[in-house]
Amino acid sequence: MTIPRAAALAAVLVLGVSLARAQPYPAKQVRVILGFPPGDTVDILVRPLAQRLSESFGQPFVVENRPGATGLIANEAVARAAPDGYVLLGAPGSSLTSSPQMHARPPFDALRDFAPIAQIGAFGYVFIAHPGVPASNVRQLVALARAKPGFLTYGSPGIGSGFHLAGELFTSMAHVRMLHVPYKGGVAVLNDMLAGRIDLMFFSLAVTQPHIRAGKLRALGVTGVKRDPLLPEVPTVDESGLKGYEMTGWHGVLAPAGTPPAILDRLNSEIARLLQTAEMKQLWAQRGMGTPSVTRAGFAQVIKSDHEKYAKLIRSAGITPQ
């Protein structure tokens, strides 16, 4: 009698998980999949962390970039991977909490298909303009946008990304109309921004700070509740006239749901230790990142809370999932 394919796969999965539990973890290479290209914000955080994990565990933690669909391709691949700790996901919060909600039938359930391991960075965005835009601050930009409805363009790494929704929240609160231009990743949108092909964008300060310092981009405001120490002279969007405006982001590491708790705990403990070392704190500070220290349960609550927050924003912005 031929064993049905589904049953055979289930048997292999159970055997694989049993072997993973029987052997010291990790016993072989661990793949960390990212849904964005090299040089993107999550990439510049996960790579040094993966290197330190390789050193700590004595096994390679290899970063694999699978860009596309605002991170959803990589997320789906990890959600469907064997829950044995050898395939992990490095992801920005938006690819779990907002991007899936832009799809009528998302390929995974962000709240059920993943086991949160650790939040590895928290940050605010910076609202930037190309120097050719005749506005040096948020108030001037709002006045320009109101005078020319639909004339200004703002780019993002993709529909449903946190940077896209930062723009949606801005246009809603400022009562202006601007044209959103989605790209396939942050590197592409940043390159077009530097070339002057788009006017505005919300993005990570970690990536844009060198261009701002060089005068290639102009910082109009930061999106956190207080000014960023990397750009203390730049006001928040809130203090620039849009009272109550706040958008922040984070990055995290997750595993497929069903991964043994012992593996999750070991990864969480080591990542938390690494993030508190002087070396990593300095590196994170240079990239405009906080180093949150949360439990796995605390990280799961962050995901749930942001999922609910973005659901409300998507509804209030009148965005229809496609």
Image (cartoon, rainbow, N blue to C red):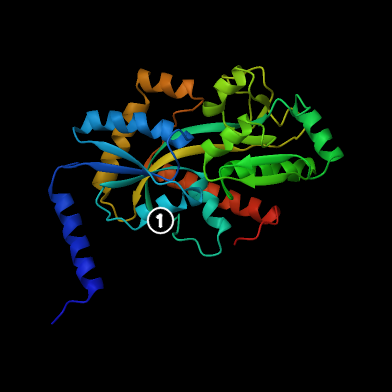
**For the point 24% across and 45% down, which residue is it?**
262
Q: Position of residue 293 (x, y in %)?
A: 41, 32
Q: Nearer the viewer, residue 188 or 316?
A: 188
Q: Is residue 2 above or below residue 208?
A: below
Q: Amino acid at mark 1?
A: Glu
Dot 1: element: helix
Give the image location of residue 10, x and y in percent.
23, 67
Q: Is residue 59 left or right of residue 194?
A: left
Q: Quadrant of the N terminus?
A: bottom left
Between residues 311 and 304, which one lies in front from this camera angle? 311
Q: Residue at x 67, y 24 (%)?
A: 218
User: Which residue of the protein is positioned furthest toward the right in this rendering?
Assistant: 147
Q: Position of residue 286 (x, y in %)?
A: 48, 20
At x 66% / y 17%, what residue is drawn? 233
Name the residue carrying label 1.
Answer: 76
In the rendered image, which quarter is residue 131 located in?
A: top right
Query: Can residue 192 be seen in this snapshot?
Result: yes
Circle 1 crowding by C-alpha within 10 Å: few under 14, some 14–19, many from 20: many
Q: Which residue: 58% across, 38% down?
A: 189
Is 149 displayed left or right of 64 in the figure? Answer: right
Q: In which quadrant of the rendered view does residue 269 lie?
A: top left
- 31 lies above or below 196: below
